[in-house]
Amino acid sequence: MERSTERVVLCMRWGALYPPGYVNILFSGTKRHLGKPFRFVCLTNETEGLDPDIETYPIPDLGFSEYHWRSGAWPKLSVFKKDLYGLRGRALFIDLDSVILDDLDPFFEVPGDFIAIGGGPNWRRGMENPKPTLASGVFAFDLGSQPQVVDRFQDDPAKAFDVFQLEQNFLETHLTSWTTWPNEWVISFKRHLRRPVLLDRILAPRMPGRDSKIVAFHGDPRPIDVVRKGNRKWAWFPRAGRGPIDWVRDYWLENGYRDDF
């Protein structure tokens, strides 16, 4: 069968942690940084407040229990269904707490079964092994190409959680193969840009490098925390951080944010 050349940007929203504005801002940022044609798809069970140009589908239920919805990001595994609402082509999944800085087209040009953030000591605390450790904030794959991920999860969802704790650990074990993005393409705000403890009391976070394409705000702080006006704290002891970060706020304003968000 001939491989589809269609490009699909995927995101996912569940629960109350990320309001619909996060999806709209990601959609706007994608339109600014990705050449057409592409489809932007949000898997969500709540569509109210989303831009009408965003394609939406319910999050497929793979047998998730309450802890799968609350701990980690297990619902992401549903994108690996053999048939995900008839979507075809190359998919680029981007977490909602991401800031897009530059051209996204290269993400669709990297070959491989599955391309993801490489993790390692600068991404996941305590991981000092130089071997890449998968982080699932930004990843690409051919839709329908990794159905074994869903099959193995559905064999025993409770065991999957007990053994792997996080969906990205489960993914790393059950993918056919995976490789990493170039290190500078996707960077972590709290690992790469935030200053070390004590220095963060006097120095603002670093600016992203010229080769960075996406900044991931995984965990705390979240983008909204460093966007709002005023002198609000967005970090807690022993960390320090107050007030908006200009380049993050500018990105959100350019993509539809208002201070009544």
Image: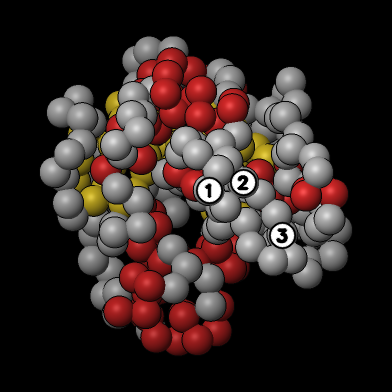
The answer to whether 156 is drawn above or below residue 122 in the figure is below
Quarter of image, res 47? top left
Q: Few, some or many C-alpha atoms within 10 Å of disc 3 (few <14, some 14-19, many ≥20)?
A: some
Question: Of the residues shown, which amino acid type is indicated by label 3?
Answer: Arg
Spot occupied by residue 129 in the image (x, y as percentages of width and height):
84, 65
**Viewer-side residue, 14 vs 86:** 14
The answer to whether 43 is drawn above or below residue 154 in the figure is above
- Residue 239's disc is 3
Split into 4 quadrants, where in the image is the N terminus? top left
Of callouts 2 and 1, which one flags the residue occurring earlier in the amino acid sequence? 1
- Residue 232's disc is 1
Q: In this view, does 86 lie to the left or right of 199?
A: left
Quarter of image, res 168? bottom right
Question: Of the residues shown, which amino acid type is indicated by label 1?
Answer: Arg
Q: Mark 2 points at which residue?
A: 242
**Viewer-side residue, 12 vs 131:** 12
**Viewer-side residue, 110 vs 132:** 132
* Visible residue check, residue 94: no
Residue at x-position 41% and y-position 66%: 74
Q: Is residue 129 left or right of residue 242?
A: right
**Viewer-side residue, 214 vs 162:** 214
Residue at x-position 46% and y-position 39%: 228
Residue at x-position 30% and y-position 79%: 66
Of callouts 1 and 3, which one flags the residue occurring earlier in the amino acid sequence? 1
Q: Few, some or many C-alpha atoms within 10 Å of disc 2 (few <14, some 14-19, many ≥20)?
A: some
